[in-house]
Amino acid sequence: MKNYAFGVDIGGTTVKLGLFDRDGNVLEKWEIPTVKENRGAGILPDVAASILAVMEGKRIEKNEVEGVGVGVPGPIDEDGVVHRAVNLGWGVFSIPKVLSGYLDMPVRAANDANAAAYGEMWQGGGKGCSNLVAVTLGTGVGGGIIVNGEILTGSTGAGGEIGHIHMEDGETEACGCGNKGCLEQYVSATGVVRLAARRLARDAAPSLLRGQELTAKAVFDGVKAGDPLAVEVARQFGEYLGKGLAMVAAVVNPDVFVIGGGVSKAGEILFDYIRPGYEKYAFHGCRDARFALATLGNDAGIFGAAGLILNQGERADADDQ
Amino acid sequence: MKNYAFGVDIGGTTVKLGLFDRDGNVLEKWEIPTVKENRGAGILPDVAASILAVMEGKRIEKNEVEGVGVGVPGPIDEDGVVHRAVNLGWGVFSIPKVLSGYLDMPVRAANDANAAAYGEMWQGGGKGCSNLVAVTLGTGVGGGIIVNGEILTGSTGAGGEIGHIHMEDGETEACGCGNKGCLEQYVSATGVVRLAARRLARDAAPSLLRGQELTAKAVFDGVKAGDPLAVEVARQFGEYLGKGLAMVAAVVNPDVFVIGGGVSKAGEILFDYIRPGYEKYAFHGCRDARFALATLGNDAGIFGAAGLILNQGERADADDQ
């Protein structure tokens, strides 16, 4: 049982890194740029060099470090092999083999949304739960599912892609994935704006939302100010998201849904709109699932990546006894 | 590593039992009645006595038996505690503790649909896969989900209840669960009959289905005979089931869907109707999932129960090395 672990969250612009102690405290956080030249060949060497420099600066020896967890924006299989991460230029290779080749320490890798879900389970809004669905309502809708304390990866790394559950037969616009009527088209930040724009165009009903830039924040600010049209949009949002999460619950039956991403900055008021839809459509055995806000924000990825390494250590220790 | 295991599948009328060898061969199969008097208090003692009698008859010693797996028609948690099995009159208690109290052998318990899914993964239509969704199209729709070779139980034992995914907002009749518009209402044997009856009532179009008892079998026999109205019903069935399984795939991303139950006796022709709906609505990363027929029929439960015990043994052995 070693004292430290590193969590790494590789994004399209920057790589976030964190040094953690065994209890899940982040001791130091920093960022380096993501250099995508040469099909991203420099990214893992840069990560390794940055970790080694921090260890040297803090006089941490390798035998004090449990290992390094890495979150990556792309499908990652059970063995940590990435199957194309288009934002980084990466093809197919084993992240644990390459990075531990540079570092000579154990490495685990996971999809970034799944790592974030793991982080929220370990130290965030889902702390204490082992069956969790994390939903990130940002530009798109990300999902991460934890079953019995482990990430649900799926057979091709597409487990937890709940933004692409089909919700609406009549949709005419296409989702980024190519299908029409995906959950993401109604409940992402962009989706909330679409719902609001459609509602505003329908008639001339007065609303605080008219004459200002339409954003998900403006919609939920309108809700808080009691604007009836904003409330109507929030109800539609909640009906879609509640229904979608009820479908997810009939499959994986979680303890808790942890809601994060830009839209979640509206706060717990979101749940007033999601819960009625959820309870209306949920199978009775799943109806008691809790809703919680994500608490780790942009750090969820580094927390989860570090947790993957530290908790694996604990499991191995438990097995040894 | 011991040579034998018993698989037990407790139903509302009979208990099925099987003696298995380590390779997954069933050496002997038999049944005893399910005695439900006294809130089913006699069921586990009867199972224990029956197993001990077979062991004595075959001169099998306890040290040759890995243990006993049990499938139960009700929610079972990770520790094998049943949370009310209404068909048996059971309340809340630990099946492993009670049954191993009678048998002095290791016991594992699982929900019967989940045990059947495990059986199909171990020795049936999903053999060789570790991420699988089993769908039983009977009077209702049962579901069992295997993730990384383990049953997905969920937080309250409602994991895999895919028959109760909401599919249709306009439905006026209620599902057995109390909701309206559940997948089960369209694709169970009863659901197929409902779809056919609705179609027949719509107009006077000629059909082989008129003037005979409406069953799911009659519908698919009509499909095989080229009856256009039966084909129309099969397409509707396939659109619902394909769409529902696409939703499931966006959550758990399985290698394979294994389709069993009475409706599946129609054979592989079912897939001609399910696949178009599936491919239309599935997220691209999940689109290559396979469809296979269940092959173990009513024995899937005893296979799965025995497999839970035998494979747990293998895992423990692997961890020891």
Image (spheres, coloured by chain):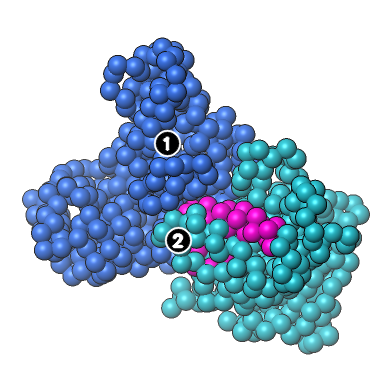
Chain colours: A cyan, B blue
Looking at the image, which residue is at 46% across and 73% down?
A319
**Relative to B228, does residue B296 appear above or below in the rendering?**
below
**Residue situated in front as seen by the camera: A313 or A222:** A222
Residue A110 visible in the displayed image: no
The image position of residue A104, as x and y in percent, is 72, 70
What is the span of residues highlighted in magenta in the rendered image?
A: A231-257
Residue located beneath label 1 in the image: B187
User: What's under tag 2, amino acid-wise?
Assistant: Cys
Instruction: Confirm whether the magenta stretch covers residue B89.
Output: no
Looking at the image, which residue is at 18% across and 43% down?
B29
- Chain under numbered label 2: A
**Residue situated in front as seen by the camera: A113 or A81:** A113
**Relative to B73, does residue B106 appear above or below in the rendering?**
below
**Relative to A64, does residue B283 appear above or below in the rendering?**
above
User: What's under tag 1, amino acid-wise?
Assistant: Val
The image position of residue B107, as x and y in percent, is 27, 63
**Relative to A104, does residue B232 appear above or below in the rendering?**
above
- Chain under numbered label 1: B
State left or right for residue B4 relative to residue B249.
left
Q: Quadrant of the C terminus of chain A?
A: bottom left
Instruction: Confirm whether the magenta stretch covers residue A241.
Output: yes
Residue located beneath label 2 in the image: A286
Residue farthest along the bottom direction in this orientation: A59
- Classify mark 1: residues with Cα within 10 Å, few (<14), some (14-19) or many (20+): many
Looking at the image, which residue is at 53% across and 32% down?
B239
**How far is mark 1 from mark 2, CA to CA?**
22 Å
SS at mark 2 in the image = helix
The image position of residue B278, as x and y in percent, is 56, 35
Residue farthest along the front direction in this orientation: A205
Residue A31 visible in the displayed image: yes
